[in-house]
Image (cartoon, rainbow, N blue to C red):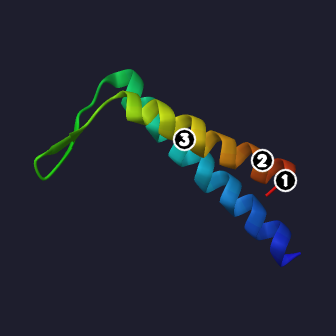
Amino acid sequence: MAKNKLSHINTVVFSIVALLHLWRAVSGLELIIGSFMFPGWASYLGFIFAGGLAYFNYKGKI
């Protein structure tokens, strides 16, 4: 039961992270840390990666 609950929590967290990446990419917000500016396309990659983790975690393949 604990593993199943942890799997659901992981799915929710990965889904939230994926949606935040998508929101940043679509809205065009800039992310600057120090003197480095992260490009917008990096958020699309983050969306695909985090979304994939959420999907496969939900399906039980991870």
Q: How far, Cα to Cα, is label 3 from label 2?
A: 13 Å
The percent coordinates of residue 50 (x first, y second) are: 58, 45
The percent coordinates of residue 34 (x first, y second) are: 12, 53
Q: Is residue 21 above or below residue 28?
A: below
First of labels 3, 1 by sequence position = 3
Amino acid type at mark 3:
Ala
Residue at the image position 40 percent from the left and 22 percent from the top: 26
Q: Quadrant of the image for the N terminus?
A: bottom right
First of labels 3, 2 by sequence position = 3
Q: Is residue 41 left or right of residue 35?
A: right
| Residue 35 disc label | none
Q: Is residue 2 left or right of residue 41?
A: right
- The answer to which quarter of the image holds residue 51 is top right
Residue at numbered disc 2: 56
Q: Residue furthest right?
A: 1
Q: Are marks 1 and 2 in contact (CB under 8 Å)?
A: yes
Q: In the structure shown, which secondary structural element does the residue marked by tag 1 occupy?
A: loop
